[in-house]
């Protein structure tokens, strides 16, 4: 019996939820944070319904997977969307009605089986290894063109039905070049940059993870560290070493891109010209943006330096040291350290005197307010000048009076 689900299309949020018919065959299981139901749509295409469990982390991961699914469809296009990537069919953010709260869920295309099912066949024979490697490289080429970093490539997240490969579970994926996407992953399966959270997200982090998965399939070994994985890869035959040797390099700049791996395997370019042009235009736009930011920062530093020079020119000069150096108080043995006055009878600066701050440096000193200059010479104040004039006038009047009497 068909089930009717109300889903919002990947890029049709404005239209609201639409009715979709699915037939679920009863197979379901519980994964971390999700309950999974498998079935097919009205056209017979296999699908999986992912229902978020309780807790914020489950809802956050589902929202992230839906956002990445919408981005992939918008950048690749529905008609060009490959089978090697799981595709978002629709999502429901969850509703609250009289019957309670319905958990959010989403429906994706599905492929049965994973690479983990091949554990009993390791190491893989060369023909099967080449088939898996080619499918994984093509999937990475699409992610590189769409500028999406998966960040969780594992034996369990790479689906394999015996003939076709599909990369699924984008709950940890982020856009390429995202600043500080956060530390995530485990040694040795994820790149050192991704595990430490340093720098931006980069598609070469997925190349590193894919190389470790392929090395696991080629050697049949479980790796405990980065060094052990690189040593195992170094013992592979020349064909596999040429493919994986640089892909697991310690530094990101030394790793090849997915398209470089494709050329090593001599695979045709799976991308259409529109998608290739999109990545080229995006890279060019980001380069221009980085150049504009560089110029903006240079102009900001130039303005800050000019403002500092202007403030320095406008600042009044502070009182300089007296000619011949700083004075020492009577009984002292020399100038105080730093040119300060020393206390009477001491050899160092006075400890109980007032300390001069930058603000007090330009205030008139108490000596200048009492009619004394800073070099100790008394200066006539206005009161002294007026008093002297009055005294002269009084004496003049007295002399005139005496002269008249006499």
Image: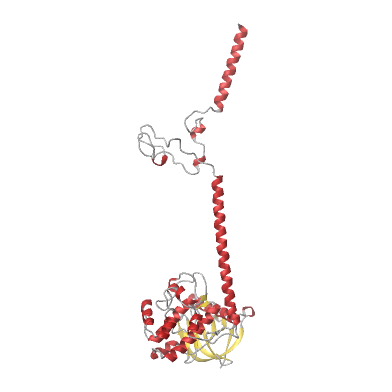
Residue 69 position by quadrant: bottom right
Residue 66 visible at all: no
Q: Farthest residue toward the top? A: 406
**Picture quarter with the N terminus:** bottom right
Residue 375 lies, in percent from the top left, at 47, 32
Residue 137 percent location from the top left of the image: 49, 84
Residue drawn where x is 56% and y is 21% of the image: 388
Q: Position of residue 324 (x, y in %)?
A: 43, 35
The front one of 42 and 184 is 184
Residue 89 versus residue 398 in the image, above or below: below
Whether residue 202 is visible, yes or no, is yes
Q: How many marks?
A: 0
Quadrant in which the C terminus is drawn: top right
- Quarter residue 225 falls in: bottom left
Q: Is 282 left, or right, of 159 in this rendering? A: right
Image position, residue 6 (x, y; %): 59, 84
> Is 23 rendered above or below residue 373?
below
Q: Residue furthest front?
A: 238
Residue in the picture at 61% in, 7% down: 405
**Scheme of colours in the image:** secondary structure
Does residue 325 sit above or below 400 in this rendering? Answer: below
- The picture quadrant where one finds residue 381 is top right
Which residue is most to the right? 15
């Amino acid at each position: 019996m068909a089930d009717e689900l109300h889903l919002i299309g990947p890029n049709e949020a404005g239209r609201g939820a639409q009715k979709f018919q699915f037939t679920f065959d009863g197979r379901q299981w519980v994964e971390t944070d999700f309950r999974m139901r498998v079935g097919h749509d009205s056209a017979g295409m296999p699908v999986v319904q992912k229902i978020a469990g309780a807790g914020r982390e489950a809802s956050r991961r589902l929202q992230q997977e839906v956002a990445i699914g919408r981005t992939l469809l918008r950048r690749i296009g529905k008609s060009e969307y490959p089978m090697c990537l799981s595709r978002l069919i629709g999502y429901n953010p969850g509703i609250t009605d009289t019957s309670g709260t319905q958990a959010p869920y989403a429906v994706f295309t599905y492929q049965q089986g994973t690479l983990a099912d091949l554990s009993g066949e390791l190491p893989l024979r060369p023909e099967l290894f080449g088939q898996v490697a080619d499918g994984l490289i093509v999937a990475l080429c699409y992610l590189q063109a769409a500028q999406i970093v998966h960040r969780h490539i594992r034996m369990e997240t790479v689906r394999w039905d015996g003939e076709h490969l599909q990369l699924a579970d984008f709950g940890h994926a982020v856009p390429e070049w995202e600043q500080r996407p956060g530390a995530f992953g485990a040694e040795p399966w994820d790149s050192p940059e991704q595990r430490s959270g340093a720098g931006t997200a980069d598609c070469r982090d997925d190349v590193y993870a894919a190389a470790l998965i392929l090395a696991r399939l080629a050697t049949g070994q479980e790796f405990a560290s980065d060094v052990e994985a690189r040593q195992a890869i170094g013992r592979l035959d020349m064909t596999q070493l040429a493919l994986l040797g640089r892909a697991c390099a310690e530094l990101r700049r030394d790793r090849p891109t997915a398209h470089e791996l494709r050329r090593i395997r001599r695979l045709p370019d799976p991308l259409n010209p529109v998608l290739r042009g999109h990545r080229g235009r995006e890279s060019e736009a980001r380069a221009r943006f980085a150049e504009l930011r560089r110029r903006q920062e240079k102009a900001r530093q130039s303005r800050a330096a000019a403002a500092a020079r202007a403030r320095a020119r406008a600042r009044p000069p502070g009182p300089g040291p007296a000619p011949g150096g700083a004075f020492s108080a009577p009984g002292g043995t020399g100038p105080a350290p730093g040119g300060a006055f020393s206390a009477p009878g001491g050899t160092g600066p006075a400890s109980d005197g007032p300390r001069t701050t930058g603000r007090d440096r330009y205030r008139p000193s108490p000596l200048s307010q009492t009619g004394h200059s800073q070099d100790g010479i008394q200066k006539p104040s206005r009161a002294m000048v007026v008093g002297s004039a009055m005294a002269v006038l009084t004496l003049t009047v007295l002399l005139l009076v005496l002269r008249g009497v006499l």
